[in-house]
Image (cartoon, rainbow, N blue to C red):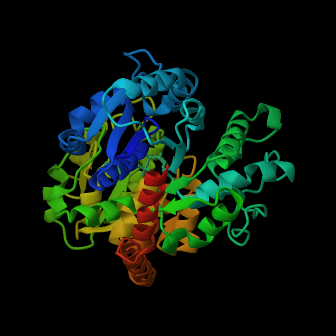
Amino acid sequence: MVSHVVLFPFPAQGHINCMLKLADLLSTSDLHITFLNTHHNHNRLSNFSSAFARLSLRPHFRFLSIPDGLPDDDPRSANALWDLDDSIRTRSGDHLRQLLTSCRQDGWPQITCVLVDSVMPFAIEPVEDLGIPAIIFRTASACSLWAYHCIPKLIETGELPFPDEPDMDEKIQGVAGMESFLRRRDLPSFCRETGDLANSRALQMVSRAVGNVNRARAIILNTCESMEGPVLHHIRSSVCPTIFAIGPLHQLLARAHQYSKEQQLSGNLWLEDRTCMAWLDTQPKGSVVYVSFGSFTVMAMDELLEFWHGFVNSGHPFLWVIRPDLVDGVESSTSTKVLFEKTIKLRVFIVEWAPQEEVLAHPAVGCFLTHSGWNSTLDSVVVGVPMICWPFFADQQINSRFVSEVWGIGLDMKDMTGREVVEIMVRRVMEGEQGKELKQSALVMAELAKRSVQEDGSSYLQFQSLLDYINSL
Ligand code: UDX
């Protein structure tokens, strides 16, 4: 019987992007695919995503959607992420159940399994209640999954919640394998709550989610053994033995499709501004700092200006993604854009959304100042571009520690914002001996990631095992 897989990502860019890539891969392997979005993102994807247009044409691929529970006119802006999370957690379980039930009579093959985003463990119950196996897809790093898993133990041993006025540089002892380098400040941001556990909403929420993930039949991760082998070992022995580490997914997909650069397809929720590609063509090799803080980060105007001064003072040209909702309280980035472009016309290029994978692969780009979202980290890893990390929240705090301390492919400036720090960081990565070393390590890591998707590579083999696993359900 033909296998039919339903994929259900959390309604946010970083989650949709990488689940869409897996959906594309599974569909290329002859499975029937239903990709489930919220109504809101279904509309955005159909407007802006080239992948949506192409995948919709495949006979065994379809996009369906359910409500996210928020009013139609809610802007769903980045600084209201928790409202979206609350709404989808409390209201979409029933919609999911109804949709899966109606799928039983719609002429498509019976559903073999549902790939549920790991940040929406509430979706496991309605799926399994209908007798359909639920598999967890973790869109973020393995190191963050392992750190989250250890949180209940850290609470038990009293390391969490932090005491009042904690020394954030103190090492954390309860995350096996990371004792020598993981500090308080590197734990996922939800651990930063101090005081009573009873008042720590985020910690309680994470503890509940950990319990659900522990009951998973199998977990799929967008990572590879060469990047996170030791952590994957801990996850296999303590969280779930059936793990498929099949990343970096864009590389596995590129291999499957033998894409040329022009054929890369996006899962964008924003309109991509491609004018920056022509600007990059005019810049010298390795000279540009690419700056993007992903899809959720919200910063104060003061912080934005500190970054801007730091970049200008560094003397390097920079390409900066300023989303319309990046700056808290500023409705549109237009005024910021005008101000910046007037002042230094030639050295800065600002867009609201970039074709990021292509930008990072452009020879003019020498460094990526990133918020350390996992997809952005992988985007940079696969093309060997060193990073400067300014993590904002969740898994980003630990990802940036791995970039700087474990892989040695970038610098971590978490919890710092001054213009002097920005300038120094840019100079250290773009100039001198340290810059050369970081570039060299980044190229080695890119080569290892590339090898993982070759025919005898770990991610390629684990993807084949995933197909066998799905077909055996
Ligand atoms: C967040 C988390 O931090 C991340 O680790 C988690 O897995 C998902 O949620 P986000 O802020 O969206 O994600 O960052 P990231 O994971 O880096 O995803 C951003 C995505 O948007 C990447 O796929 C990137 O290629 C894309 N992007 C970003 C663009 O295509 N253009 C841009 O201008 C900026």
Give above or below for 142 relative to 268.
Answer: below
Q: Nearer the viewer, residue 333 or 60?
A: 60
The residue lying toward the viewer, choosing from 58 and 415, is 58
Q: Which residue is drawn at 41% across and 75% down?
A: 457
**Residue at 32% from the left image edge and 26% from the top image edge:** 106
Place of residue 411 in the rendered image (x, y in percent of width and height, measured from the top left):
50, 68
Q: Is residue 235 visible?
A: yes
Q: Residue furthest front?
A: 1
Residue at 74 percent of width and 35 percent of height: 200
**In this picture, residue 212 sits left or right of residue 101:** right
Is 247 left or right of 337, judged from the image as shown? right
Q: Report the label total.
A: 0
Residue placed most toward the observer, 39 or 74: 39
Q: Can residue 390 be seen in this view?
A: no
Residue 275: percent from left, percent from top: 15, 50
Q: In which quarter of the image is residue 290?
A: bottom left
Counting from the top left corner in percent of width and height, residue 469 is at 48, 56
Q: Position of residue 244 (x, y in %)?
A: 51, 61
The single residue placed furthest to the right in the displayed view is 157
Q: Which of 353 and 12 is in front in this view?
A: 12
